[in-house]
Amino acid sequence: MNSNKKVIIFDASTLINFAMNGSLDVLVKLRQNFNVQFIVPKAVKFEVVDHPMQIKQYELEALKINKLITDKILELPDSLGMAESEINHETAKILNTSNSSFYAKGKALHMVDKGEVSCIAVSILCYRKKIENLIAADERTVRMICENPVNLQKLLEKKLHTKIELKENFFFSEHVRFIRSSELMYIAYKKGLLDIKGSEVLDAVLYATKYKGNAISRDEIEEMKKLSKV
Amino acid sequence: MIEKEHVLSMLKEVKEAISQKDVLKLKDLSNQTIHSASIYQDPDNITLAVIIYSLSKLLERSEYRENKDWPKLIEGFINNVEKAITFLEKNEDEKFSIELQEVRDSIDHLSGDFKKQIQNVFQKASINKASRIYEHGISMEKTSKLLGVSLFELASYAGSTSTADVDLGITLPVSKRIKYAQEFFE
């Protein structure tokens, strides 16, 4: 791997989490204090800036995220020398596989959409360019497809009360690694980058991510708190 | 329309439940729609899920029933359901879809605060159903598009549910995920 470059690719769910918790400044501090580039694919930008800009209720959050792009805290994949056409090509392949893998009652379940999958596409392209990378995604389904599709199959069976057939091998999942807003908050806490100090802060920020849609369980939060003391 | 027979029998139960103000029955029927909506993802199934849940919420709250426009509204809903049943029985799928849409459109004929309140009930029902479909395993972005709700609304709502507290959703030990992050921020 190219040791000079480390990249975190942001899904909409994680950026929304930081924005709705009023914690976007944490991303700024992480970016400014470490040599890690933050990437937002165009399809994700649409979900967190272009689309919510049209909804009065979320216009302010959209503007704040857009400012991070203007200030180059978040960058588009072209900053890594990636053409939009190659991202689109890779995204289409992953979308096709993901959405033709889980079958219920003889029908392929449409599991995921473009923005989420474009993060995996950028991750794969980074891997090919030997750029070390992580995906930051609070959303659960995409992470499960990559990390444990059998668990997702079981979850679907349990929830839909029907047999689910898992047909595909996920060619894209081998080199993809995920973190969430919770792990980024954990790092910020450990590095002293949070404005509020005190013994309850980690508990508060981790639960705050959970309540804004981060797919993290209470048990995981409690474990993180224990690990922080080691 | 997918699973026509099932939808037909459900709509007949919906009609019965509305006339008996059976909120629990409507909630149960609404839950049943989630499975079909998650699997088939066809607009009619999804619209139906939102309508049935909204009806349960409307009937639950007595203050709506005190509004002067309430009788006209609920009569209109029953009329829509009856027509939808007839169209489905005659295999007139397009007219069935239009009739379901008519339920939402009929709210536009209301006025003032009551209109806003009813619109709010339907909007919240959409977010609730989106959250339930996400809980069933369909991704957040896909679900938000199916229901026409924003990712911001869905993330917030889903975060307040127990969706993330399912063991099957834990796909990597916390310690390993933290290690991934630590390696990037040394």
Image: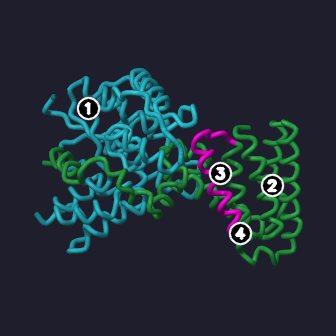
Chain colours: A cyan, B green
Question: Are dots 3 and 1 on a single chain?
Answer: no
Question: Are dots 2 and 3 on a single chain?
Answer: yes
Badge 4: residue crowd in 10 Å (few <14, some 14–19, many ≥20): some
In the image, B117: left or right of A115?
right
Image spot of residue A224 (x, y percent) = 22, 61
Badge 1: residue crowd in 10 Å (few <14, some 14–19, many ≥20): some
Residue to which mark 1 is pinned: A175
* Numbered label attached to residue B12: 2
- Residue at 64% x, 59% y: name it: B125
Magenta residues (range): B24-43
User: Is label 2 in contact with label 3 (beta carbons under 8 Å)?
Assistant: no
For marks 4 and 2, give the one nearer the viewer.
Answer: 2
Is residue A175 shown above or below A158?
A: above
Q: What's the CA distance linking mark 3 and mark 4?
A: 16 Å
Q: What's the CA distance linking mark 4 and mark 2?
A: 15 Å
In the image, B126: left or right of A123?
right
Residue to which mark 4 is pinned: B23
In the image, B18: left or right of A193?
right
Our reading of the magenta stretch's main secondary structure is helix
User: Is label 3 in contact with label 4 (beta carbons under 8 Å)?
Assistant: no
Q: What's the CA distance linking mark 2 and mark 1?
A: 51 Å
Residue to which mark 3 is pinned: B33
Image spot of residue A152 (x, y percent) = 41, 43
Identity of the amino acid at label 1? His
